Amino acid sequence: MTMRVAVQMDPIQDVNVDGDTTFAMMEEAQARGAELWVYQTEHLSWLAGRVTARARPVTVKHVQGDHATLGDEVLLDLADDVDVVLMRQDPPFDMAYQTAAHLLELLKGQTLVLNDPAWVRSSPEKIIPLLFPDIIPPTLISRDEAAIRAFREDFPDTIIKPLYGNGGAGVFRLKPGDGNLSSLLEMFFTQSREPVIAQAFLPAVSEGDKRILLVDGDPVGAINRVPQKGETRSNMHVGGVAESSSLDAADKKICDAIGPMLKDRDLLLVGIDVIGGRLTEINVTSPTGVQELKRFSGVDTCSVFWDVVERRLIS
């Protein structure tokens, strides 16, 4: 059977072929003989009971700048014309993102959508760790300034960041004695009606922020992301450097704790962030790191992923 895969993603012309996880997933699918289409969320529609996408067929190759050959636009009925939809566009996790998840949820029982859009929508990456309070850092989610100030009194070295941000954007560290809390909250609350997330600063971040990849609830491997000197954030978007890593006992304990939940929610490809043995995020929207993991360890997360998908399509 030829697998037919539609990928809901950001424009493929803009990806970095040496680092982009979605591109690597597409390469592996194509190597297995799959037909591929790409589209963006603005091309997704519902009409008269049908979920459709204005999509373009694509072939990919690992040559930056010549990495995607796009065909003429077609209207795909996502219930009839494809076997798998990959929901892989990057956040922000806003109403446009959630609306796309609502529409893709209507395909349940007809087309395999991964990660499961209902659970993606209901598993924000900084909120879902709250299900596991024993393995996360001291954490507060609030818009109440009094609660935030009280938290900082308990934890004078504090990280404050947007609740639905990504890629390290808007992450601030307030060291003991830093007088910028009022200005910082004013900036956040002027820009958004959302709460913020505050967490106790973990000094172990200087040694790296470990990204662990899981497929179907089981850990596949890990990389470490080390922040640049003088930088709190280790995200590769802001200059963090990836290095080889492995799972230690604390990492395995975390994976054992969250794995059954990920499997139950059909969150097939997940990337979790761990600092000093503490879980900080569970990334379910468009987790990254598969190419770095393969370069360092030889572990092919994409192959593991598509093995699971193919088994599901056959069963």
Image (cartoon, rainbow, N blue to C red):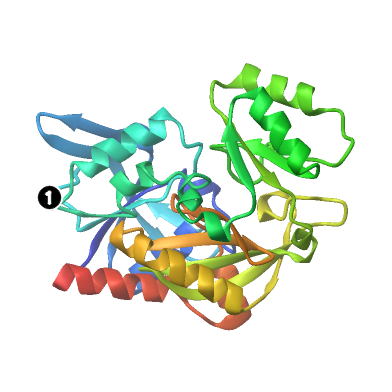
Residue 5 appears left or right of 217: left
Residue drawn at 55 percent across, 64 percent down? 63
Q: Residue 54 sits in which quadrant?
A: top left
Which residue was labeled with disc 1?
Answer: 80
Residue 6 appears left or right of 11: left
Depth check: give the residue in front, 30 or 153.
153
Residue drawn at 54 percent across, 47 percent down? 14
The image shows a total of numbered marks equal to 1
Depth check: give the residue in front, 27 or 256.
256
Residue 169 lies, in percent from the top left, at 66, 40
Quadrant housing the N terminus: bottom left
Position of residue 121 relative to residue 228, above or below, is above
Name the residue at the bottom extreme.
298
**SS class of the residue under badge 1?**
loop
Q: Residue 243: tell me if it is visible.
A: yes
Depth check: give the residue in front, 50 or 229.
229
Residue drawn at 50 percent across, 52 percent down? 129
Depth check: give the residue in front, 201 or 103.
201
Q: Residue 22 sits in which quadrant?
A: bottom left
- Which amino acid does the dot numbered 1 rest on? Asp
Residue 287 lies, in percent from the top left, at 50, 56
Name the residue at the top extreme.
190
